[in-house]
Image: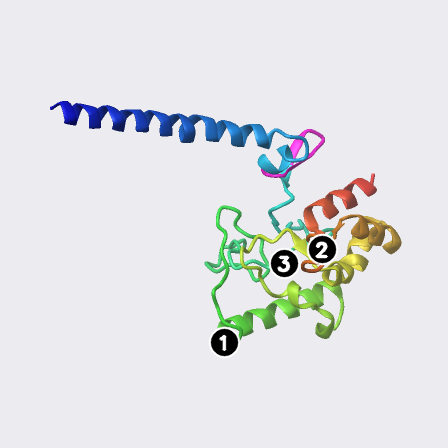
Amino acid sequence: MNSLAKQTLAGLRILLVLTVLTGVLYPLGVWVVSRLPGLQANAEGSVVNVNGRTVGSDLIGIDPVAKDPSHDPYFHTRPSAVAQDLDGDGSADQLGPADASTSMGSNKGGFDPDLVATIKARKEIIAKREGVDESRVPADAVTASGSGLDPDISAAYADLQIPRVARENGLSEEQVRRLVDESTDGRGLGFLGDPGVNVLKLNIAVQAARR
């Protein structure tokens, strides 16, 4: 019994120490670090507010939906494999918007017949929307990211949309191009990947320029 009692007490002491370390000190340390200047916004989800109202996160791309598709004033994100069904026909819309509660890719290979057909349909829709030849539609405009919620688009896709956005918002193309440049992020660590244009920030900037 004496040996059993010693082992029990030793186990209880270890449990107490680990509970304090992993259940109190570690979470507290993470919280303290998250309050440091420059890290707090990231820790809170990089929430974007406009006039005191939350409008989204600059880490999550949700494609905006125009009230009148024939007069579309928005820049658009990449399509999503988790797009919502807006027309109620039981199938997801080709271009979005994404369902922010779900993050996933299509898991279809590049030669999958359904994916090939989807990409072709997307290219036709975008070319018609922007009034250009299908050959001018960049790859990221018709292919979904792995998460389906990519917040950025390529500079080429943003450039393709500038004439329409400028026209529908009563702005000059030069004004809109300047806003695109201001919303463009550099390469990761200065050399990783390609520059990307944050669609949420860009649309907010365009709406602000209209006033």
Q: Mark 2 — residue?
A: 187
Q: Which residue corresponds to the image point at 80% horizontal and 48% vertical from the top-left?
A: 182
Residue 162 vs 117, above or below: the answer is: above
Dividing the picture into quarters, in which one does residue 129 lie?
bottom right
Nearest the eye: 71 or 63? 63
Label 1 – label 3 distance at C-alpha = 20 Å
Dividing the picture into quarters, in which one does residue 3 lie?
top left
Q: Mark 1 — residue?
A: 113
Q: Mark 3 — residue?
A: 78
Using a 10 Å C-alpha cutoff, classify the residue at mark 2 as few (fewer than 14 neighbours), some (14 to 19) or many (20 or more): few
Q: Which residues are magenta?
A: 45-54
Q: Amino acid at mark 2?
A: Arg
Label 2 – label 3 distance at C-alpha = 19 Å
Q: Amino acid at mark 1?
A: Pro
Indicate which disc, 1 or 3, sits on the residue closer to the N terminus.
3
- Secondary structure mostly seen in the magenta stretch: strand
Q: Which residue corresponds to the image point at 52% horizontal and 50% vertical from the top-left?
A: 99
User: Quarter of the image containing the N terminus?
Assistant: top left
Q: Which residue corresponds to the image point at 26% horizontal and 26% vertical from the top-left?
A: 10
Indicate which disc, 2 or 1, sits on the residue closer to the N terminus.
1
User: Quarter of the image containing the C terminus?
Assistant: top right
Indicate which disc, 2 or 3, sits on the residue closer to the N terminus.
3
Residues tagged 2 and 3 counted as in contact (Cβ below 8 A): no
Location of residue 158 in the rendering, given as x and y in whole percent from the top left corner: 74, 58
Dividing the picture into quarters, in which one does residue 69 lie?
bottom right
Residue 46 left/right relative to 158? left
Numbered disc in front, either 2 or 3: 2
